[in-house]
Image (cartoon, helix red, strand yellow):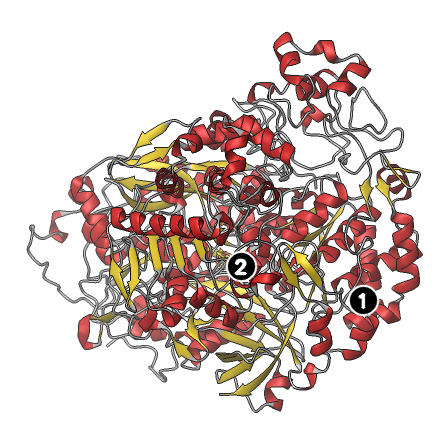
Amino acid sequence: MARMKFISDAERCIECNGCVTACKNEHEIPWGVNRRRVVTIDDGIPGERSISVACMHCSDAPCIAVCPVDTIYKTTEGIVLHDKDLCIGCGYCFYACPFGAPQFPQDGAFGLRGKMDKCTFCAGGPEADGSEAEFKKYGRNRISEGKLPACAEMCSTKALLGGDGDVIADIYRNRVVFRGKGSEVWGWGTAYGKPEKQQPQQQPAAQGAKS
Amino acid sequence: MTAAALVPLGLVAGCGEKPVTVYKAGKYQGKADSQPWDNERFKGDRNAWEKAIKDRSVAQNEYARVAHSK
Amino acid sequence: MLLTKKASSQAGTRGRLSRQVAGYLGNTLDRRAFLKRSGLAVGAGAFATQLPFAMIDKAEAAKQGGGETRVARTVCTHCSVGCSIDAHVQNGVWVRQEPVFDSPLNLGAHCAKGAAAREHGMTDHSARLKYPMKLEGGKWKKLSWDQAMKEVTDKMLAIRKDSGPDAVYWIGSSKHSNEQAYLMRKFVSFWGTNNCDHQARICHSTTVAGVANTWGYGAMTNSYNDMQNSKAILFLGSNACEAHPVSMLHTLHAKENGAKIIVCDPRFTRTAAKADYFVRIRSGGDVAFIFGLLHHIFKNGWEDKEYIRQRVYGMDKVKEEVMAKWTPDKVQDVTGVPEEQVYTVAKMISENRPSTIVWAMGQTQHSNGNAVVRASCILELALGNVGKSGGGTNIYRGHDNVQGATDVGPNPDSLPGYYGIVEGSWKYWCRVWGVDFEWVKKQFASPAMMTKPGITVSRWIDGVLEKNENIDQDSNLRAVVYWGHAPNSQTRGKEMVEAMKKLDLLVVIDPYPSATAAMAAMVRQDGVYLLPACTQYETSGSVTASGRSLQWRERAIEPLFESKPDHTLMLAFAKKFGFDKELAKNYKIVKDKDGWDEPEPESILREINRGVWTIGYTGQSPERLKLHMKNQHTFDVKTLRAKGGPCDGDYYGLPWPCYGTPEMKHPGTPHLYDTSKHVMDGGGNFRANFGVEKDGVNLLAEDGSASKGADLQFGYPEFDHLLLKKLGWWDDLTEAEKKEAEGKNWKTDLSGGIIRVTMKNHGCHPFGNAKARAVVWNFPDPIPQHREPLYSPRPDLVDKYPTHDDKKAFWRLPTLYKTIQQANKDISKEYPLIMTSGRLVEYEGGGEEQRSNPWLAELQQDMFVEINPKDANDRGVKAGDYVWVETPTKARLKVKAQVTERVGAGTVFLPFHFSGWWMGKDMLEYYPPGSAPIVRGEAVNTATTYGYDSVTMMQETKTTLCKIAKA
Ligand code: SF4
Ligand code: SF4
Ligand code: SF4
């Protein structure tokens, strides 16, 4: 069974922002909202490295725990999604998230804080897959089309990998063998470190449906 | 969409009606979601979906397209 | 409440995230974070957060129509890597963009620009030019196409009548497809002038001239993919991470497999961040640095002596010069690089062969650019790397089709395929075009003007401003047509507005003409016309990537708004000028939805196929190219060769030269001059283009050096009918071929018979088999010389390495060298900082198109200058402050200070993609309403100084001087 994860390979990332605009393009994300960002450290000096960051879809997602209206859920594939209809825009998830993933676009002309928006692993939300409602609220649902995140699929150097954790870990491991360095994967301890418990029961769909 | 049909009735309100939120601590309160293979494209065939996803994962590996000796 | 973490600060995502990232990786912030956090990201403040989900309505409209989704395969228009894109189109709307994993060039990958390709002016708030406009009484006014075409062409014909055809200057485009660029050269010829040019002049003209004169063809020898076969890659004058991002997929793959990456640059670029070894050199010291490398190579006997003996002319003379003149102390004096570092680089590229050198505008845009690139060629020749997989000179071109437009497009000194502009070449092309040579001749002011190279785009302003008695044509330029070219990419912007002011007529044909429009509107009241052209996603045609592979773009969507494809417009102009019949004689004409005549791109490509034998643009028929696009998955990523399938044996995109007729099935040439392969397998050798001997020295290859399986295993001259007869091969020709080939050579035989017999039957190269030239005796500096930039920070070095003498009539204009250098010898007292410029990954060229794209514009909102902490502190400048950058022209740029060690003390860097501010002032009021790009800023070239290459008139952008003060 696929457990979706991201890997961001600092040895390869060239801070080209392809992942960022791929996301904007696929989901038509408005100005000022960034589901994905590229962070660079030691900019301009030896040791400069970049990392592409979005929601990591953590195993034990802190956002789920803090949400006061329990609007965040996890799918069978380990993707962390939420229902915008319930979201009250309180921002707690933002403070809980170790990756700064949740975004709060301003809503309308009054500068009110809108509903939370974040990376969906290109899996949409709890509306009918590929429906207009889903697109408007959450963006496109590539996962239900059998595709993977636009950001990873378009990454210029394949620094950003997204997909079944086992498969992408193999891809990454193979690289590490060739180059002999960079074996630690950024963010994985924080995101996936803990054993993957209580994953299935958070999937809100019918358990008895099909599997 | 066919997906909606697979969601237990208890969780879905009628068309146009807003679902009533009953707050229960620690449990997801939103609308139900469907499985990614429960749609027109995959017609509930989970294996087909898994295979599609696997292919797309492998597509991100340029080593798969380059002959190597090491 | 389930609140487990307390909101403690408003510092925001960025701070916490950065800390966490830093915990793993290090500690300082990147330039975007820095700009944003210092509250600087205000360039588009009003825009932010209010922008609706941009294209949702269009997408919905498409959905409601419920139409089928059509997938068009096109190619990114933002750089020469040539990444494929699948456009999903519904009811005529481009609704989605999907990665093309099958493409062997990019395997689905994109940088920011390519991944944002779909947003290219599709929305109503877009800055695209939507209909023709003119400037009238200082105001922009909408026009109908009929009215606009009538007014523009009437004015042009009037100018032609008064002042002759040379009074109009045509600036074509490296963003045109091959067909459009080719048609443009033909169109300008029929107008009667050689006054045309395009971006290649200011991009790689020095490369094309320098490299072609060294060994035959002026192009990248290998390919981006071939990086995977290199053992050491030296980037000198290229920041590929920002300029050619997806090429890094291949480069980093090579690195993972043991290749050493070396970067030499005045800046610690992002490419440097990925290198095994970085050397900081003084801007403008390139020749000295390369000869410093050669010094160690010769001293240690690392050169490939057998290769040099067989295949290189003049290396002994270079060696003498290098050993005498470029000792480590002198190299250090000029470049600032200590001996040990130079030695380390020399050793790395010698011990890890095949090695390759990569360059872009860091080498070319200098007043001695032709010498720099030739020094690079000599380095690779000395190491025996040229003509080998994993080796070569990998010259990264800029625009998506700058290679193709150079090959077949509007160059002022050559006809398509580098045929030259001598009478014989004109006659040859008239034969291909099916027009009467005497008629074309009469279109020109005189036969002399027909064979005189035109003015270059780098100097058109002098064609307007220079005193009439000093210029080498009758009239000054009175009208300029900017047909797909930015104004802010040419130097001396301050003088450019003066030239714009003086013109009778300025016509801009472009999807985004706004930078030119605003500059002109700032100084004029009328006489400016804007005509909307569509982008390459809205038409079809072929495009040549840097690695010489041709790819076919399918039309994704219909031209947006009232725009038209460039080739349609060329035909429309030709109708008004009265030579449409001649122009379109060989083309199929298709009517578009508004009833305009479009010359079908396929039939234009077929005409190119029939004429461009010299560089092998003959085998790439539209059918073959389309077959490649459909079968991308059959091509190997490392060799680019198809294994099985309908393209079996072909190299991807039939990289030119793809000799002979399409029926001859040449597979294309993956690596130029590669003797390890048969010529019908893409092999080759150096070109015999410079005679058979020089001062008693044999210029042909020595015995034993020839392409694999050639009947002649020694040097030989190029093939013509006489040589065929002498060798007894004439009878291999068919009767029909004989008839055409009689009296011709391989370049002018329209039957392709000479090529077929030479290559297929005898395994020989039609252009002969000669040595490469380390000494190019027909250039001002036969052996490349270091010459100090005209604006040098080192008066002492100006004495030791002075520039050239002034030239009187050079590309029709007087050109100054010594006069400028001497007058400014001590200017560094007042302007002490070296000013250089370069690329940002989000933008390209003049940047108008990308700065109008919200997905890209959001990522780079401010024009800035990179300044070293020492220089900043000396001037009391803090990060994020506005500063004035002033150059010796007294032009002043108001930009934000980015204080960083990326640049060394004494050097500052500015990106060149901005426009829309003029010396501190936002030009918003001068833009046609609604067409201003989202992000505007100072154009660095407003302030750049005088300086041109002594062969090609390349402009100096990389080394000048400035001073900086807090604003
Ligand atoms: S997975 Fe999808 S939603 Fe998340 S950052 Fe990537 S493109 Fe954006
Ligand atoms: S697209 Fe890839 S290389 Fe570019 S910034 Fe994103 S993760 Fe890094
Ligand atoms: S700009 Fe160049 S590297 Fe980026 S996607 Fe386009 S072709 Fe590829």
Q: Does the residue labelled 2 lie within 8 Å of ligand 3?
A: no
- At x 31%, y 73%, the residue is C925
First of labels 1, 2 by sequence position: 1
Q: Mark 1 lies on which chain?
A: C
In the rendered view, does C867 fall on the left or right side of C350?
A: left
| Image depth: mark 1 or mark 2 in front | 2
Residue C937 location, x and y as percent?
A: 43, 72
Q: Is residue C610 above or below residue C165?
A: above
| Residue C401 visible in the picture | yes
In the rendered view, does B27 fall on the left or right side of C549?
A: left
In the rendered view, does A115 fall on the left or right side of B52?
A: left
Q: Nearer the viewer, residue C815 or C130?
A: C815
**Looking at the figure, which quarter contains the N terminus of chain C?**
bottom left
- At x 69%, y 82%, the residue is C828
In the rendered view, does B20 fall on the left or right side of A107?
A: left
| Residue C532 visible in the picture | no
In the rendered structure, which amino acid carries the disc numbered 2?
Answer: Trp
Q: Distance between the Cα atoms at labels 1 and 2?
A: 42 Å
Q: Mark on residue C460?
A: 2
In the rendered structure, which amino acid carries the disc numbered 1?
Answer: Gln
Classify residue C773 by image quadrant. top right
